[in-house]
Amino acid sequence: MDHNQIITLLGEEAEYLLNHKCEKISREKIYHPHANLVQDVFGSSDRSPQVIDNLKRLYQTGKLANSGYLYIFPIDQGIEHTAAYSFYHNPDYFDPENVLLTAIEGGANAITAPLGLLGLVANKYADQIPLIVKVTHNELMTYPNKHHQVPFASAQQAYNMGAIGVGATVYFGSNLSTTEIQVVSEIFAEAHQLGLFTVLWCYPRNDAYYREDGDYNQAIDLTAQAIHLGVTMEADIIKQKFPSPHRGFPALQYSKYTDEMYDALLTDHPIDLLRYQVLHAYGGRIPVINSGGEAGEDDDLREAVRTAVINKRGGGSGLIMGRKVFKKSKREGISLMNAVMDVYLDSEITVA
């Protein structure tokens, strides 16, 4: 997909998104993705040479190799959203090998998946694509359902199968978030000791965040503060949902805030919202990647490209996108993946 095709796909929003300039948090205030990001950011950190080498391998793999951007292919939906619900459009994705082949043929930097899936194919594919073991999950079998991420695997198991990273989720704000922070922090510490890098899904989650006037689980201030907690836990990469302009702290009347902090740093423009998230990741030194969002019907291509444009222009480092891919044929799914990557390879789409 070339630049003109991206403009056409964005339609009425093309100028709004492609010509926007961030004024409140200028591009000079954040660290930009670039080819030498790993060494520049982590070379002076406490990360071991093995962690740094594994991060370099991640950034040097796939269609986005050496661009400073990432496309990570996720397949934890079978646990987080139930397997049949996630894959009934394309039952081929119940087979781990089909998942790995799609990630490889699609040009992803890495695949992130549960222990069992990767364990079945690790010996065959660990040298072909970086493996990231997702070690915590929120299973949906407990009745009633609750928001709680629990360990399904360890950093040692990920290391033993040849993975180069581990991923985990913390539901910040949930009733069990303190336990999750402690557990994941310990897993991340062990992962770093073993030479594995860490990826944290930083999701605000609490029933009280769902209100008639909006879903504050994706509010800009809640998601940004979750990111800041995540980098405090030494996540090497942060995964966050795309933010809504809702301001959760004043609406929910909790935490610490002032109107001036919103006025000084925010507008409701989606690129400015993304920039606010990036700022919370130590000024962009820790990469922020967004989810591709729910799968729709006919607008998946436009929505995926739109999200990539906003992420890139806001200073983000890429996407984790799976659900939009799984509900299509393999050929259509790979085409969607490549369209997203084309945004990050387009030199005319710059950090705003």
Image: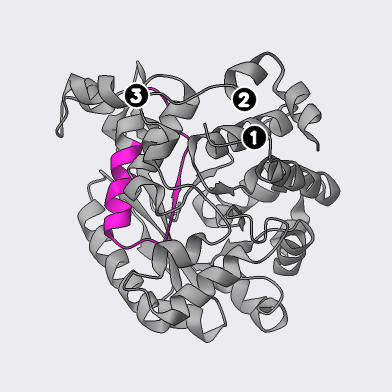
The residue lying at 61 percent from left, 38 percent from top is: 308
| Label placed on residue 247 | none
Which residue in the protein does label 1 denote?
349
Whole-percent x and y of residue 289?
Answer: 50, 47
Q: Earlier in the sequence, mark 1 or mark 3?
A: 3
| SS for callout 2 | helix
Q: Earlier in the sequence, mark 1 or mark 2?
A: 2
Position of 44 with respect to 288 (left or right) is left
Whole-percent x and y of residue 305?
Answer: 67, 34
Q: Earlier in the sequence, mark 3 or mark 2?
A: 2
Q: How many other residues sit within 10 Å of disc 1, few (<14), some (14-19) or many (≥20)?
A: some
Q: How many other residues sit within 10 Å of disc 2, few (<14), some (14-19) or many (≥20)?
A: some
The reply to whether callout 1 and callout 2 are in contact (CB within 8 Å) is yes
| Label placed on residue 266 | 3
**The quadrant where residue 192 appears:** bottom left
| Label placed on residue 18 | 2
Q: Nearer the viewer, residue 2 or 192?
A: 2
Whole-percent x and y of residue 272?
Answer: 43, 27
Whole-percent x and y of residue 300?
Answer: 70, 32
Q: Is residue 313 above or below residue 97?
A: above
Q: Is residue 310 visible?
A: yes
Q: Amino acid at mark 2?
A: Leu
**The quadrant where residue 19 appears:** top right
Q: Nearer the viewer, residue 146 or 103?
A: 103
Q: Which residues are magenta?
A: 223-246
The residue lying at 30 percent from left, 32 percent from top is: 221
Q: How many other residues sit within 10 Å of disc 3, few (<14), some (14-19) or many (≥20)?
A: many
Q: Amino acid at mark 1?
A: Ile
The residue lying at 70 percent from left, 60 percent from top is: 94
Between the C-alphas of marks 3 and 2, the distance is 18 Å
